[in-house]
Amino acid sequence: MMTRNDLKPTGRWRCTGIVTACIALVSVANVSLAQGGPPNFRMARLFSIEAVNETDAQLSFFVGQAGSYRILARDVADGEERVVTTGSVSRAGVSSWVDKGVLDAPGQRFYAVDVTIPKSPKGRSFDWGLYVHERTADASHLVSFPLDVTEMTRLQGPFGKQLMYGLAAGTSTNDADRVAVMNADGEWVSAYLVKAADGEAQWRDADLKTPSSLEMQAGRAFWIHRKSGDPYMTSKGIFAGPLPTQPVAVHFTSAARGITPFGVYGPEPKRHSNTEKAVRYSTAANQLGFATLGSGGSTADIRRDGELGDQIWVWGGDGWAKRYWLMGHLGDKWDGKWWDPQANDFADFSLEPGVGYYYVHRTNNWGGTDFDWAP
């Protein structure tokens, strides 16, 4: 069973992944970077990050003219950048650099390429985020993709190749790793990782012949069901891509038992803090933005269905480790805040990018309608 400490990242957060250059760009006028000012796509472009072995990852980037470059990195989205390598090129073209040891441990890292061109404006790439997770064998993992590739991420393409890291192809539905996505009807639809005749792995339907047409939506969570086969390239699961520049709303519904698998879209964790140790009843309401949208309830007792509030469920690797309850109709000291029944106190937890959660939306005595939420 996961403990409270297991819900929070520990150690040095790092990661990597693969995303190709066919990424739709966002207007530079709408980009607000934490570091260094607006990007100059013509002079600097980071376009792929791939695992090269169990511990190392290669960044590939484009420099638009002869000049010098720096690769900048930070371990938190709003942290201070540091220079991790420098170099120069004699003409426009693609260069690469291997970040050794970046896959050693689960976590995150953020990169940008900064270019100095003689007699030209200084160039900077869009910022990229990189996440790594452990793909433990014989376990299920609830994940979400927090980065900007496209609005929909298809398995038959770069995202599907990236998703193969840390997983193993099989020859039957019994030994093939698979992903499962909830459709609009609330049903889980699976795709299986199968080795084709040419030896390459491919995502296929349950008949193991038809290429899967599954798509992953930004802000929605999905399942990875890992078997015991030898993983592709590394034991780590890898997500990488440009940081989102615009929020994406996720639709939450009370249909299909009220379950919406969701995740944080963007690099910043979303936190609900318990401040009771400082001042009693000081825990702020609506810290995650659900209180004014969802259904608050006066109890967590499942026998009192009409009084139940919404819940957030946290997966612990072998079962549901935590359930938090949205309170309402109890008075100002309680309404709009999340409660932790295990701790018997106001909740203290974070929604982490790259991790998936279940949101259970209720229709209770006080109502409850569909809503859209964006972090």
Image: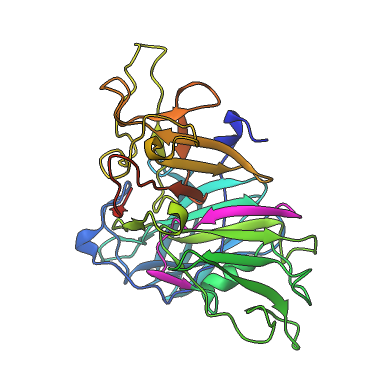
Compared to 190, does 321 lie above or below?
above
Please provide percent x and percent y for residue 294: 32, 44
Please provide percent x and percent y for residue 197: 76, 88
Could you say which is closer to the camera, residue 286 or residue 123? 286
Residue 240 in view, yes or no: yes
- Residue 138 lies in magenta, yes or no? yes
Residue drawn at point x = 44 percent, y = 48 percent: 359
Identity of the residue furthest to the left in this view: 29
Could you say which is closer to the camera, residue 89 or residue 128? 128
Residue 65 in view, yes or no: no
Could you say which is closer to the camera, residue 149 or residue 120? 149
Q: Is residue 212 left or right of residue 372?
A: right
Q: Start and end of the magenta stretch?
A: 136-153
Could you say which is closer to the camera, residue 91 or residue 214? 214
Q: Quadrant of the N terminus?
A: top right
Q: How many marks?
A: 0
Please provide percent x and percent y for residue 186: 48, 63
Q: Quadrant of residue 66?
A: bottom left
Q: Quadrant of residue 6?
A: top right
Figure colour scheme: rainbow
Please provide percent x and percent y for residue 317: 66, 46
Residue drawn at point x = 36 percent, y = 34 percent: 297
Compared to 63, does 373 lie above or below?
above
- Residue 218 lies in magenta, yes or no? no
Residue drawn at point x = 43 percent, y = 59 percent: 147
